[in-house]
Amino acid sequence: MDAGFDARLREGDVAFDARDATLLRAIDDGGSLNAAAAELGRSYARAHARLADLEAAFGPLVERQRGGSGGGGSRLTGNATRLLARFDRLRSAVSGTVEAEETVVSGRVVDREGELATVETAAGSLRALAPADADAVQVGVRADAITLHPSGDAPRTGATSARNRLRGSVTAVDRGEAIARVAVDVGTDAPLVALVTVDSVERLGLAPGKPVVATFKATATRAVPAPDASDD
């Protein structure tokens, strides 16, 4: 279980995302699942299976009508309309945080593997994209690139070798309508900041003092040369 930041709504193991919203709207526009699949260039079988998964998690989404003077077809249920409205509110909140906050950690390059460098920091070793001639660096991690996990449910290091893992504890949770800003003490001067959905805050019980593991892709982590102290 994780608290990844994305424009998606979760119910159990099923996540409703932009692709699913597009499918529902295409059904509404085309009047049938078959027409929607054709319009979107998706196979009918996969669209049907996905709709079944969504309905098992979120409840009835499409009302099917057979025959009759109108020739049958499908239309969205009130539940589907409410789900789409809820998703649109979440996506609007996400778009408002495009200029996501970034945590900057200072460190020193201790190893390289192609474009990826291993940087030793106060929080531990991080892998990041770094310029070839950099030694002392500053590593930037965007808040929307970070996933939070309960400390006992984090991916094993070997299973996620392309991801950085930092252990810490939550120091603050600032909730918006759909998105929350979560600050995590990982041993650096400034806390690591992650953006997660409010649903994830509730599901994971994120609150000050909660131990967590923050993970983020090495390829989403950028290191730049640290300012020369002599320039001060």
Image (cartoon, rainbow, N blue to C red):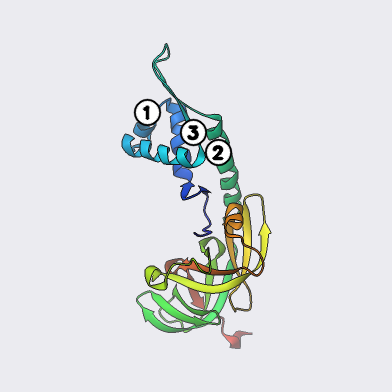
Q: Position of residue 21 (x, y in %)?
A: 48, 39
**Eye-nearest disc, 3 or 1:** 3
**Eye-nearest disc, 2 or 1:** 2
Q: Is there CB contact under 8 Å for labels 2 and 3?
A: yes
- Please rate how many residues cluster around mark 3, counting C-alpha atoms within 10 Å: few if below 14, some from 14 to 19, many from 20: many
Residue in the foreground of this view, choosing between 60 and 127: 60
Q: Earlier in the sequence, mark 2 or mark 3?
A: 3
Instruction: From this view, report whether residue 195 is shown above or below residue 152.
Output: above
Q: Residue at x 42, y 41 (%)?
A: 53
Residue in the foreground of this view, choosing between 46 and 131: 46
Q: Which residue is mark 1?
A: 35
Q: Secondary structure at mark 1?
A: helix
Type of the residue with mark 1: Ala
Q: Which residue is mark 2?
A: 83
Q: Position of residue 59 (x, y in %)?
A: 50, 37
Q: Residue at x 34, y 37 (%)?
A: 41
Q: Which residue is mark 3?
A: 61
Type of the residue with mark 3: Leu
Q: Is there CB contact under 8 Å for labels 3 and 1?
A: no
